[in-house]
Image (cartoon, helix red, strand yellow):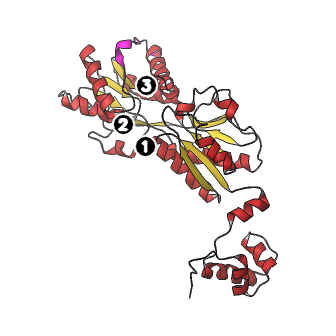
Amino acid sequence: MTVQRLGRHVSVKDVAARSGVSFQTTSKVLNGGGSVSEVTRARILQAATDLGYVPNLQARSLVMQKTQTVGVITSDFRDHDLSRLIGGAEQEARRQGYGVMIASIEPEGSLTEYALPAMMERRVDGILLAAPQMEEDLALEHVLDRALPVVSLHHVPGGGVATVGSDHELTGALATRHLVERGHRVIATVTGTRGRRVTQSRLRGYRRVLEDADLPVDADLVEEGMWLIDGAVLATHRLLDRRPGITAIFAQNDVMAIGVLSALRGMGKRVPEDCSVVGCDDIDMAAYTIPPLTTVHIPFYETGAEAMRLLLSMAAGGAAPPRGVLLPVHLIVRGSTAAA
């Protein structure tokens, strides 16, 4: 019968007394070592389970000079894409026996106000940056401790920080090429926030495909949706007011694509018969919109996990990492697109 001891910390001495094995041997076994028989090892581990033993990470960190904790600095927890990135990173850290400390910064905040000092004070073994507003912060390369491993999910000025992400110019090109190949010639796009690198990259992909197809690159076919449903609804109305002949719209994320679908429905336009719509990201909801949304799949969860694997490899003294790791993206065709 298992007995869970509550109310106080169960020590190695408690486990040793329960198992009838010396303190030194018990300590080695509980730390993953010890040259003992399998019977003895099993007796120690069973005693630890019965007592509810939890390793003292503070004591272990003093011995190993490692806290077995990594920091994740992020921005808006409401961002669905960021939550998937962080979810992948946290689960990979947990799989490798690391704890995760998460701190957020305000949209216009600075890394040095709270998040970075808090991480440094707690002696984290590495930091994962998931804060897109830092991508143009020129001071960032000077405040990061070069002795501390850092991996970012977004661009960091100076080129000294390893990054993990996707080719966003390719995502814009995949979405636009799909529409061109279906015979569309008046293709609009609803962009994210203009200042973001991902916005500009996806816009370059869109423009490149139009140029390659000898189609005009028209500023009247580009509207900013600010990554929001409401922003995309307004952007769609502005686009169709200016250019009623639009037959296809590429929205730079699926959230805005949902806004585009709503706006078109409100204007009495059928999708895809009157206007095709392509999104980007492949959020869970994309397969259940009416009609189901054609989109470009971005591997958010896998990106977070890969970034954490790279960070933990660096923390363990691994070889110098590649400066930019790009994970593959691909188009998923559903019912929101058709031939012009």
Residue 322, quarter of picture: top right
Name the secondary structure under disc 3.
Answer: helix
In the picture, the disc for residue 255 is: 2
What residue span does the magenta drawing correspond to?
213-225
In-image side of 138 versus 251 (left or right): right
Dot 3 crowding, Cα within 10 Å, few <14, some 14–19, many 20+: many
Quadrant the C terminus occupies: top left
Residue carrying label 1: 80
Name the secondary structure under disc 1.
Answer: helix
Name the secondary structure under disc 2.
Answer: helix
For marks 3 and 1, give the CA distance: 26 Å
Quadrant the N terminus occupies: bottom right
Dot 2 crowding, Cα within 10 Å, few <14, some 14–19, many 20+: many
Residue visible at 62% across and 41% down? 116
53 versus 340 height, above or below: below
Q: Amino acid at mark 2?
A: Val
Residue visible at 38% across and 33% down? 279
Residue carrying label 3: 177
226 versus 75 height, above or below: above
**Percent from the top left, x then y, of residue 187?**
35, 20
Residue visible at 78% across and 73% down? 28
Q: Earlier in the sequence, mark 3 or mark 1?
A: 1
